[in-house]
Amino acid sequence: MNGLHFLRTFVAVARHGSFSEAAEQVGVTQAAVSFQMRSLETELGRKLFDRSGRLAILNAEARELVPEVESLLNAWERIRKPRGKTGELVGSVTVGALVSCMSTLLHVVSRLKMDHPGLDVRVLHGQTNGLAARVLAGELDAAFVVECSHLSPALSWLPMYREPLVILAHADAHGDDAVSVLTGNPYLRFDASQRTGALAERTLREMGVSIEAFMELNSITELAALVEQGFGVTVVPRLRDALWADNPKLRVIALPEHVRTPHRSIGMIERSDHARQDVTTYIREQCARMWSCQEGSTAAG
């Protein structure tokens, strides 16, 4: 509903005092904020801003509207939230996740559906950048992603666990140490436009290793599959759910001691004001419990 999106932007402008800061808050461009505010003025049939040069300041009538608009938005969020019996979760929720998080997430969602049959849960997978954009746009209620360096103020970040980067090679790969393995075999690169790929590239630079990529992919599981088939080596996070160390076809090689071992942080993002936080909180807590159990089992082993 464009009208509601425009009203949210209007409140952001009122709170932050400028189109540029409001744009950052709601996750759109400054030009989009300007368009939305002019459209809102047309819809309401009144001027909301005193415009002078490049500045646009709420006028007195607009300032009087702010509490009413906030009340309307709060009422809409209450209306959107389905009502069930006490303790019962109902309605619909959509959660995104990296492929590496899917196994745990699907297990939690399956149990959730058994306990709350009135709840409709959709699970989608994707890359961090795309998932974060969909959460910001309201297409997803939450997503499990890699920590972003520049997260919109409209989103909240809840860290879950960390995965250190390692070198993954075939058991028969040439080389006895990290550098010789990387330079002595075709290199399979993770998409450098993604945060995980950027971490891997930074690690190679810190090691002083300069190599041309034989192939570039944006899926860690696909990279691992190619390594297992003997097509090359790669630098990737050691996935929480992966059983690489138990695979006789694979070698998991730690980075050299002089390299500050980088890691990627996995967590959940969600909009700060969405209506299904009861469900997303439950999913997050259950996933955290499972990941904590897995970590304990790994340490014990």
Image (cartoon, rainbow, N blue to C red):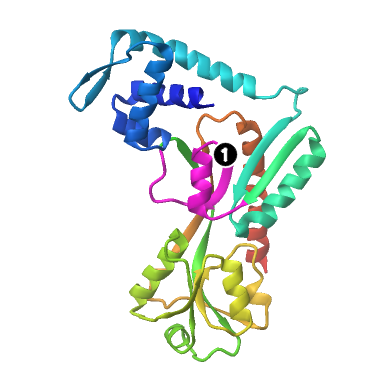
Q: Is residue 250 above or below residue 283?
A: below
Residue 196 lies within the magenta run:
no
Which element is circle 1 on?
loop
- Quadrant, the C terminus: bottom right
Indicate the position of residue 24 as horizontal and vertical percent values: 36, 36
Q: Amino acid at mark 1?
A: Glu
Q: Residue at x 58, y 22 (%)?
A: 77
Where residue 14 sits: x, y (%)? 35, 20
The N terminus lies in quadrant: top right
Tell which of 52 and 216 is nearer to you.
Answer: 52
Boundaries of the magenta span: 125-152
Q: Is residue 159 visible?
A: no
Q: Quadrant of residue 180?
A: bottom left
Residue 146: where, in percent of width, then height?
50, 54
Q: Is residue 190 above or below residue 174?
A: above
Residue depicted at x 51% and y 19%: 73
Can I make out residue 244 in this image? yes
* Up/down of 241 relative to 80, above or below: below
Q: Quadrant of residue 285?
A: top right
Residue 208: give x, y in percent of width and height: 33, 79
Q: Which residue in the structure is indicated by mark 1? A: 139
The reply, left or right, for residue 279 in relation to residue 235 is: right
Count of marks overlaid on the render: 1
Left or right of 119? Residue 237 is: left
Mark 1 burial class by Cα count in 10 Å: few <14, some 14-19, many 20+: some
Q: Considering only vertical position in the picture, is 295 above or below 149?
A: below
